[in-house]
Image (tube, grey):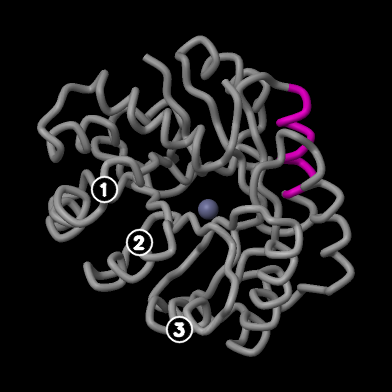
Amino acid sequence: MRWIDTHCHLNDVKAFPNVDDDLRELADLGIGTIIIGVDPESSRRAVELADHHDLVWAVVGRHPNYAANFHSSELQSYSEWLSHPKVVALGEIGLDWHWDFATPEQQYSALRQQLALAIDLDVPIVIHCREAYDDLIEELSGRERRPRCVFHCFAGSASHAQTVLLWDSWFGVDGPVTYPKSSELRQLIGTVVPRDRLVLETDSPYLSPIPYRGKPNHPRFLPLIGDEVARTWQVDLEEVARVTTQNAVECFGITL
Ligand SMILES: [Zn+2]
């Protein structure tokens, strides 16, 4: 079986001090990874890892929780990195009303400038949205043009999902789908989200699936998320691996 973890932070030096060993292990397990930046420094590291390893790709950008330190000048770096064939999207970008590390004004400013860049370069965006679905969808709806959207760890309602499906968006599913309380999410991916729009993610080192909940997450746990999707779709694990890997290839335009 081949898998792609479409959202992880193996560029987090504290959480993954021996990342080259991790990436060798993942290659043996048949698990590719898309490593996500949250600021210029972590984005640079994601690009370096993608450059040095097979089955590793990078996403570069400024996370809304770090928007207080966003400077327009960093767009130039993102733009240059995005010309690398293994840098596949701009992200993670978005809005986060759960934390207040950055003001709404700072978050909107970073989001809007990065949206303009993504449209300019015609690249997909990886969206971080926490407790801000109405506002984020309003921001994107009001636009004449918008990039292809990957909703990382989708946590909106069925009506949010239906709206963003009109834009051909993609949905990231993570460890929380394995939690007992996530019946609404399981129902959403069983009924509203088309199977060809779903990609799997771990968000490592965060959001560990059961039975590792509360411990650091690792992309090697990705098949546990696949297991839950297999139960929801009522298919076997091989089918989930095949479909979601193909989806990742199409969504991010990558070549295996
Ligand atoms: Zn993330």
Circle 2 is placed at which residue position? Answer: 165
- Identify whether 91 is placed above or below 144: above
Quadrant of residue 94 within the rendered picture:
bottom right
Of the numbered discs in the image, which one, if any, rests on residue 138? 3
Q: Which amino acid lies under the numbered mark 3 shown in the image of this protein?
A: Glu
Residue 217 at x, y percent in the picture: 43, 38
Residue at 60% from the left image edge and 22% from the top image edge? 55
Residue 220 at x, y percent in the picture: 43, 25
Of the numbered discs in the image, which one, if any, rests on residue 194? 1
Quadrant of residue 169 within the rendered picture:
bottom left
Q: Which amino acid lies under the numbered mark 1 shown in the image of this protein?
A: Pro
Asked whether 114 or 70 is in front, the reply is 114
Q: Are marks 2 and 3 in contact (CB under 8 Å)?
A: no
Residue 255 at x, y percent in the picture: 60, 25
Residue neighbourhood size for the residue with mark 3, other residues' Cα within 10 Å, grouped as few (<14), some (14–19), many (≥20): few
The magenta-colored residue range is: 43-52
